[in-house]
Image: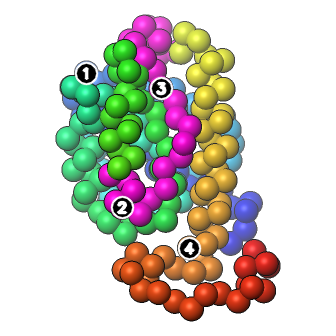
Amino acid sequence: MSNETPIRIALIYGSTRKGRFCDTVVRWATREITQAGAFELDAIDPAAPGALHDRLRRADAFIVVTPEYNHGYPAPLKALIDEVGAEWHAKPVAFVSYGGVSGGLRAVEQLRQVFAELHAVTIRDSVSFAGAHERFDENGEAREPERARRSMTRLLAQLQWWAITLREARHTRPYADAAAGKFSAQPALAEIQTA
């Protein structure tokens, strides 16, 4: 599988609330991801996920756009995450969060634990919008676009590295046996050195 093959990102809405601010943040994230030019994007809304298993299986990586409600992430997001299992395995997950004072970071830290249980790799850097309603204008544009863009560029660079690395690893050595706790003989040193 070539490094030139675009990374398929599933961009996951974290909220289903009526009048949700999530739409504003997702539109911003979509523009940033599209401008990067290295990704194919599939936006998944928990309110209407469609063929969820297939969409997540095809994804090389995930970006979860999550609010923080009452110091946690929304229940519909948890339901979407729990709907599938192996589709998350050995794939990277990044976060764009928003909220009040914490900017959604408490929700993100809880989600890191959930995704670790699902054998996914979470990306260290994230994008966070504290006081989110003040961080975007009435047209949905970021009020401090350069600051937000720098954070998103760093996130996408890390996500791309992990996505390529894990995609190649899944192609070379499928993860299902490791996830099931089945040990296989260590690969030959020559196999590792050619990677």
Left or right: 6 in relation to 20: right
Which residue occupies 64% across, 70% down? 168
Real-space Cα separation, disc 4 to disc 2, in angstroms: 15 Å
Of mark 2 and mark 1, the one earlier in the sequence is 1
Task: Please state which of the two labelled residues, at mark 1 or mark 4, is closer to the viewer.
Answer: 4
Q: Quarter holding the N terminus?
A: bottom right
Which residue occupies 79% across, 79% down? 194
Q: Quarter holding the C terminus?
A: bottom right
Real-space Cα separation, disc 2 to disc 1, in angstroms: 31 Å
Q: Position of residue 75 (x, y in %)?
A: 20, 41
User: 103 or 135: which is nearer to us?
Assistant: 103
Instruction: Return the mark for residue 19.
Output: 1
Q: Residues within 10 Å of mark 1 (few under 14, many from 20)?
A: few
Q: Position of residue 135 (x, y in %)?
A: 47, 12
The magenta-colored residue range is 114-141
Q: Which residue is mark 2?
A: 118
Give SS at disc 1.
Answer: loop
- Magenta stretch contains residue 132: yes
Which residue occupies 65% across, 60% down? 164
Q: Which residue is mark 3?
A: 128
Real-space Cα separation, disc 1 to disc 4, in angstroms: 39 Å
Q: Residues within 10 Å of mark 2 (few under 14, many from 20)?
A: many
